[in-house]
Structures are given as C-alpha cells and as structure tokens.
Image: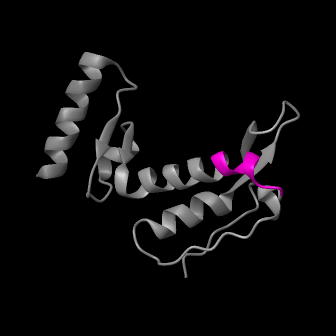
C-alpha cells in the first residue's frame, strides 16, 4: 500500500515538476518506484557521498596520491557497505589542471564483494 502511495506521489511530482524531479528517502529501504523514478536514499547514498567528498577534499592535502592510499571501512551496516562499494568501484585521479582537480571514473572490471 505504501509503495503505491509513493509511486502515485512520484507520478504527480513528475507531472508538476518534470521527469527529473528527485525524491529523497530517509530511513527507508528502496522500493519498486526507485527503478522508474529519480530517487536518493540518504542512508545509503548520502553517507557514501559525504565520504567520497571528504576523500576528494583530502587529495590536495596529501603527499600520497589517493590511488596509492589504503582505505579501511569498519562495519558492514547500511552506511559502511555502500561507502566501501562506492570507493572500491570509483578510481580517483588528478587531472593536469592543478592540485585538487580530481577526475572520477568507474572501472568495469572492479567488483565489490559484501562478504
């Protein structure tokens, strides 16, 4: 029932604000509407975004390239696993445009095992 309500709300929001309207979920598991609507789960993607932002901000302050640093994740909860998955599947490299200008890309052959 709740998923139907969320789906109806998303359809109305898309009709009013356009197809790229974003709904942020807090403390909620992803539902079926996540496949057909633009959604952001704060518990999963929010924490990973903040961690990645911190790593990107630290790049210019470190004398070691981030590609050579080791990342340690403690815990396997709703924050730790997505953080590790995001960081392990995202490589960070500096551009030739000066310090603090990182470039992100995903490697297709990198896999993350949650075990």
Please name the residue shown 18% across and 34% down the image: 9
* Quarter occupied by residue 69: bottom right
x, y percentage for residue 17? 29, 18
Q: Nearer the viewer, residue 104 or 37?
A: 104
Q: Nearer the viewer, residue 110 or 27?
A: 27
x, y percentage for residue 21? 35, 27
Q: Is residue 39 above or below residue 3?
A: above
Q: Is residue 49 above or below residue 86?
A: above
x, y percentage for residue 66? 77, 57
Q: Nearer the viewer, residue 54 or 14?
A: 54
Please name the residue shown 43% across and 65% down the image: 79
Tell me where the magenta segment starts and ends, as one range: 57-63
Residue 58 is a magenta residue? yes
Q: Provide the major secondary structure of the magenta segment.
A: helix
Residue 51 is a magenta residue? no
* Quarter occupied by residue 40: top left
- Residue 106 appears in the figure: no
- Residue 83 appears in the figure: yes
């Amino acid at each position: 029932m709740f998923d139907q309500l969320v789906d109806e709300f998303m359809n109305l929001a898309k009709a009013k604000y356009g197809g790229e309207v974003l709904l942020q979920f807090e403390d909620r598991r992803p539902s079926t509407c996540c496949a057909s609507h633009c959604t952001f789960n704060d518990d999963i993607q929010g924490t990973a975004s903040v961690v990645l932002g911190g790593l990107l901000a630290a790049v210019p302050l470190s004398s070691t390239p981030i590609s050579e640093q080791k990342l340690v994740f403690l815990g396997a909860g709703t924050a730790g696993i997505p953080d590790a998955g995001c960081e392990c599947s995202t490589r960070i490299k500096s551009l030739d445009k000066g310090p603090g200008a990182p470039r992100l890309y995903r490697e297709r052959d990198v896999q993350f095992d949650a075990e």
